[in-house]
Image (tube, grey):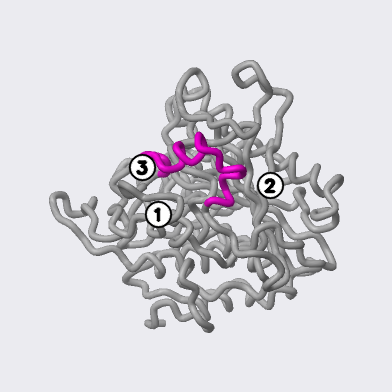
Amino acid sequence: MSSFGGGGGARSKVTGLAPGPFGVGVTTVQFEDRSRDDGGACRKLQTEIWYPAAPASGPPNRYRDFLGAATPEIIAAAERPDAIGGYAEGLTIAALDASWPQSAMRDAPPLPTAAPWPAVVFSHGSGAFRASYAFWTEFLASHGYVVAACDHPGSARFTLNDGAVVTPGGPRSKRARMERDRVADVFAVLDGLEGLARTDSRFAGRVDARNAAVTGMSFGGWTAAAALERGDARVKAGVLMCPSLASSDGGALAAGHGATAPALVVIGAEDTVIGEEGNAAARRYAADHGGPAALLEIVRGGHVSFTSCELYNPTYGNGIGPSKSLTTPGATYEPLPIADQHAVVNSYGLAFLNARLKPPGHALREQAGDVYGAAYLERNHFNDAEVKYTEVKCDIL
């Protein structure tokens, strides 16, 4: 096929690909891991959850809603120039409210469902923020997933702990400590979702944390890969976006032999953050993964192609706006429009997750009205000059 972005339906501002049939609710919770000490108290994780909801069943979500009480201390932290990766100088909470997607509804009632929705846990990149990937998290929820993303204290630009601002620094920001904490955070969130299914009337019968995927971007891609290495039976798949696979122990994750759950590895060929070495490691991971794997490359994509940074800095570079080239040193290139890049990630990512978490016979397989596998990609195909997709081990869609 030659048509780029061939999916039917009106494209959304955020994803570039028509959203699913469900409205999206969003709520903030704080999970606690009492098994870990984090500076004299247990590890506390400010977590955002996106989930299917009835259309127009709650107020539109604003950026400030991620900040809770939004005290002067919190607002000051959120408006710092380095508060989120790619933050534009002088940007205010009011400006972020205006630019942030308002398709999700704050604390909307979850949609009734005949069977629990599969769970997806997302891990943010270094120096990022749990809500900076709305293009992906909201899109998945609109197709029938419960998506949870926590801030990782120590590597998040800022987070909240019982309403108090926590910024990087100290022992929790040492690389080896962050690696241990991040993986444990993923499973603490998964445990937390299981707890919500038991104790929270909003999510009882609506989330299946034993049918889950882990996803992440950059350091979060490393985190997702490390989580797959655990072999937890609840985790059925992983999506690794521009994963920074070098680790403090010498890079054992680059091989990926210890993981057997299917993995989709997504990279930008022009990514100057992880560079040629990082992209080569990602390709090796897909090739040597212990289970089924696929590699998706966006030819004119960079590192921040896999974020929603364009919402607050449309000239960020490295995949958003004119960018320095990796493949042609000293040159600049014009990335694929960010809406199209997001459409690529969402299209292939959804097809991959549907195949693993909603296999034939699953009670929710047809509920979102999705077309599956090869038929889905036939409908949502992308120009081969812009997107390279390779299934390494077998047909996994």
- Kind of residue at disc 3: Gly
Residue bearing mark 2: 235
Dot 2, how many residues are within 10 Å of its Cα: few (below 14), some (14-19), or many (20+)?
Answer: many
Image-quadrant location for residue 365: bottom right
Q: How far apart are marks 2 and 3 (CA)?
A: 25 Å
Alpha carbon distance from label 3 to label 1:
21 Å
* Mark 1: few/some/many CA within 10 Å (<14, 14-19, 20+): many
10 Å neighbourhood of mark 3: few (<14), some, or many (≥20)? many
Q: What stretch is highlighted in magenta?
A: 64-84
Q: Where is residue 376 in the image (x, y as percent from the top left)?
A: 57, 76
Whether residue 295 is visible, yes or no, is yes
What residue is rendered at 71% in x and 29% in y? 33
Q: Which residue is the site of mark 1? A: 309
* Along the viewing direction, whichever of 141 and 285 lies nearer the viewer: 141
Q: Name the outermost residue toward the front.
A: 72
Disc 1 secondary structure class = helix
Residue drawn at x 67%, y 20% is 41
Question: In the displayed structure, does residue 338 sit left or right of residue 176?
Answer: left
Q: Upstream in the sequence, badge 3 or badge 1?
A: 3
Q: Looking at the image, is mark 2 or mark 1 earlier in the sequence?
A: 2
Dividing the picture into quadrants, the one containing residue 357 is bottom right
Say which amino acid is labelled 1: Cys
Q: In this view, does 356 lie above or below 371?
A: above
Residue 22 as seen in the image, left or right of residue 88: right
Sequence-wise, the earlier of marks 2 and 3 is 2
The residue identified by callout 3 is: 278
In the rendered structure, find residue 252 and report the number of the disc placed on it.
none
Q: Is residue 54 left or right of residue 337?
A: right
